[in-house]
């Protein structure tokens, strides 16, 4: 199973990301090249990148299974303020250039929110922006993420995703998110049927990454609130079957589940659940005492 989680990209940059991923016994991971809510970015340190790649090679992590995520502040859907729209385009170009510098093949992107724009115009704005960005021929491929439909999010169904892939002039891929799909109204316990539908409308070869997240919400809630594996409305067995699905066996699975504290929703100090969630999925065994396992491990 190719599986990992979101990890940090701090003072040691990619090297720190690799070390964190290995602490969770992961063979894949995802990171932001800086805070997802702002534009502050440090110059890529070539020596840290070289050391990271050396450690990855020594530990069997294929760089093709390392994913970058674009910052949330990029919004290609809304063009009311053309200056802000072009800012999003320029910032996305910077992130792609950083990925190329790091040797990363995939950058996951939230398509954007209409925010008052008619949906069809917002979808076209996204296509127009991506066509501008991709004129520069980056090595890194953009993966458009399936969204929950919270607020005015675009990319909330297969029809909108299909529109992107048919109208963007150069190749882009797709990142599935199980929580987002569930919250958008797709039944994850019928995942094979979903993949058949996806294949007809888009093509399975476009799926390059899957975010494995449970959901705190009922089906079709359009809220996007992630839950820990097996502790939400999707459930452990369904998420396990998605991870084991033969048609996606070569696609990296990335956990974005919440950190936990003394309780699931603690406001105080929090700990990552990924070591134990990855273990659950690899062993195909649900841990009924996940919170206790995490607290015991990090407080020993």
Image (spheres, rainbow, N blue to C red):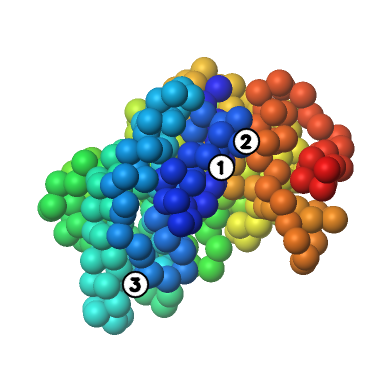
Horizontal relation, residue 124 to residue 73: left or right: left
Which element carries disc 1, helix, strand or loop?
A: helix
Please count the marks in the image: 3
Picture residue at 28% right of the left edge, 47% below the top: 46
Note whether residue 156 is visible: no
Q: Nearer the viewer, residue 285 or 169?
A: 285
Label 3 vs label 1: CA separation?
A: 36 Å
Label 2 vs label 3: CA separation?
A: 38 Å
Which element carries disc 3, helix, strand or loop?
A: loop
Q: Are marks 3 and 1 in contact (CB under 8 Å)?
A: no
**Residue designated by label 3:** 78
Q: Are marks 2 and 3 in contact (CB under 8 Å)?
A: no
Above or below 78: residue 236: above
Picture residue at 54% right of the left edge, 46% below the top: 6
Q: Are marks 1 and 2 in contact (CB under 8 Å)?
A: yes
Q: Nearer the viewer, residue 104 or 248?
A: 104
Label 1 vs label 2: CA separation?
A: 7 Å
Which element carries disc 2, helix, strand or loop?
A: loop
Could you classify mark 2 by the number of other residues whose Cα lies within 10 Å: few (under 14), some (14-19), or many (20 or more)?
many
Q: Quadrant of the C terminus?
A: top right
Picture residue at 66% right of the left edge, 40% below the top: 274
Q: Position of residue 98 (x, y in %)?
A: 28, 53
Q: Position of residue 59 (x, y in %)?
A: 48, 24
Picture residue at 77% right of the left edge, 45% below the top: 298
Above or below 280: residue 113: below
**Residue designated by label 2:** 24
Q: Nearer the viewer, residue 277 or 296?
A: 296
Note whether residue 108 is visible: yes
Q: Position of residue 70 (x, y in %)?
A: 39, 56
Q: Quadrant of the N terminus?
A: top right
Could you classify mark 1 by the number of other residues whose Cα lies within 10 Å: few (under 14), some (14-19), or many (20 or more)?
some
**Residue designated by label 1:** 20
């Amino acid at each position: 199973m190719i599986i990992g989680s979101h990890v940090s990209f701090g003072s040691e940059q990619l090297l720190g990301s690799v070390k964190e991923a290995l602490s969770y016994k992961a063979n894949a991971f995802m990171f932001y090249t800086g805070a997802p809510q702002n534009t502050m970015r440090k110059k890529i340190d070539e020596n840290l990148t070289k050391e990271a790649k050396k450690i990855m090679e020594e530990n069997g992590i294929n760089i093709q299974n390392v994913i970058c995520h674009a910052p949330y502040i990029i919004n290609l859907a809304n063009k009311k303020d053309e200056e802000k729209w072009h800012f999003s385009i320029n910032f996305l170009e910077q992130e792609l250039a950083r990925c190329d510098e790091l040797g990363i093949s995939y950058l996951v992107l939230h398509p954007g929110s209409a925010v008052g724009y008619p949906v069809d115009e917002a979808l076209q704005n996204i296509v127009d922006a991506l066509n501008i960005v991709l004129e520069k021929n980056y090595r890194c491929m953009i993966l458009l993420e399936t969204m929950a439909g919270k607020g005015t999010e675009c990319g909330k169904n297969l029809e909108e995703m299909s529109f992107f892939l048919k109208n963007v002039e150069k190749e882009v891929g797709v990142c599935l998110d199980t929580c987002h799909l569930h919250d958008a109204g797709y039944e994850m316990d019928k995942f094979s049927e979903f993949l058949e539908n996806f294949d007809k409308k888009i093509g399975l070869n476009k799926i390059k990454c899957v975010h494995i997240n449970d959901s705190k919400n009922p089906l079709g809630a359009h809220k996007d609130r992630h839950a820990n594996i097996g502790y939400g409305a999707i459930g452990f067995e369904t998420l396990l079957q998605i991870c084991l699905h033969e048609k996606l066996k070569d696609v990296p699975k990335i956990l974005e589940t919440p950190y936990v504290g003394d309780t699931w929703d603690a406001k105080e100090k929090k700990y990552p659940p990924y070591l134990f969630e990855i273990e659950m999925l690899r062993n195909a065994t649900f841990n009924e005492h996940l919170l206790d396992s995490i607290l015991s491990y990090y407080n020993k």
